[in-house]
Image: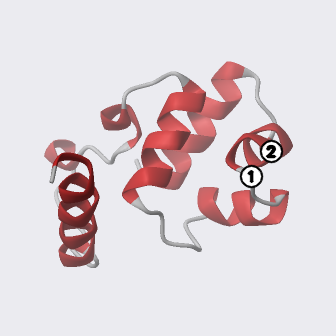
Amino acid sequence: MQFGNAIRIQRVIKGYSQEYMASRLNISQNAYSKLEREETELSVRRIYEIAEILEVSVYQLLPDVSSSSVVNLSGLGRLVTKSRTFFNGLFG
């Protein structure tokens, strides 16, 4: 399952509209729609914000690579770098 699809599924389960999610994230509905369609990159902070709104673990939103025969590694380096920067900012 892709990240955007996982967000959409959890949003629908909660009964939240895209407008509601966008409002909680302080973005437009169009920008939120692009998140679910994976047309925009997400920061680590934004991933945590979405998980908090949906009341799920971040891990429930991330793709399950163990069940996939092909792992898409594009952008992994950037994600690792962003994660380091985020956590260094939190914990010094």
Image coordinates for residue 28, horizontal then vertical, percent: 82, 60
- Tell me residue 35's x, y (percent): 61, 61
Q: Nearer the viewer, residue 89 or 65?
A: 89
**Gap in angstroms between the C-alphas marked 2 and 1:** 5 Å
Say few, some or many: other residues with alpha carbon within 10 Å of mark 1 (under 14 / 14 to 19 / 20 or more): few
Q: Is residue 71 visible?
A: no
Tell me what residue is drawn at x 74 percent, y 65 percent. 31
From the viewer's perspective, is residue 81 above or below residue 25? below
**Residue 26: mark:** 1
Disc 2 to disc 1: CB gap under 8 Å = yes
What amino acid is found at the position of numbered circle 1 in the picture? Asn
Q: What residue is shown with label 2?
A: 23
Say which amino acid is labelled 2. Answer: Ser
Q: Position of residue 46 (x, y in %)?
A: 50, 52
The image quarter in which residue 62 lies? top left
Residue occupying the point 20% across, 50% down: 65
